[in-house]
Image: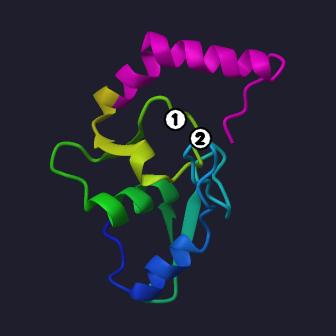
Amino acid sequence: MRLPPDPAFVSAFWSHVADVDEHGHRRWLAGCSEDGYGIFTWPGVDGRRVKFRAHRVSLELTAGPAPDGAPWALHRWPCHLRDCVAADHLKWGTPLQNSADRDSPSRRAQLRSARDDAGGQLHLL
């Protein structure tokens, strides 16, 4: 879905993004979906609200539209925070690349460590 060509859209989006933390993350401060990804809601042209995944908006605003053949907004390793919208933590990719990243030994070890730190429960919100 194309982003609205409205400067107010860009301003409103960035107003919901936290400053960079000590790990380089920029967390989404507004609502999140049930799966933990940030959701940015914008009034549509006809008054119907349009919802965007916040990490996709961030990537498109900073890197341009998704290239042909790589329509997914992926988090770069080692970022595993679904609500992180830091441009340098994101990249365009394919569903296959997303699955390969998720299943990589380094990502698995990272998620296992985070789960252990959380006392056996890992909530990526």
| Residue 34, horizontal then vertical, whole percent | 66, 46
Foreground of the two, 69 or 29: 29
Q: Pointer 2: residues within 10 angstroms few (<14), some, or many (20+)?
A: few
Q: For mark 2, give the secondary structure.
A: loop
Say which residue appears at 80% left-offset and 24% top-offset.
118
Q: Which mark's residue is nearer the viewer, 1 or 2?
A: 2
Q: Which residue is mark 2?
A: 23
Three-letter amino acid code at disc 1? Cys
What main secondary structure does the magenta stretch of the protein show?
helix
Say which residue appears at 44% left-offset and 16% top-offset.
103
Q: For mark 1, give the secondary structure.
A: loop
Say which residue appears at 32% left-offset and 33% top-offset.
95
Residue 96's disc number:
none
Q: Residue 63, relative to residue 51: is it above or below?
A: above
Q: Is residue 93 left or right of residue 7?
A: left
Tags 1 and 2 touching, CB below 8 Å = no
Foreground of the two, 4 or 29: 29
**Mark 1 or mark 2, earlier in chain:** 2
Q: Is residue 36 left or right of residue 40?
A: right
Q: Where is residue 93, by image quadrant?
A: top left
Q: Is residue 101 magenta?
A: yes
Stretch of the chain drawn in magenta: 98-125
Residue 79's disc number:
1
| Residue 124, horizontal then vertical, whole percent | 66, 35
Q: Where is residue 58, by image quadrant?
A: bottom left
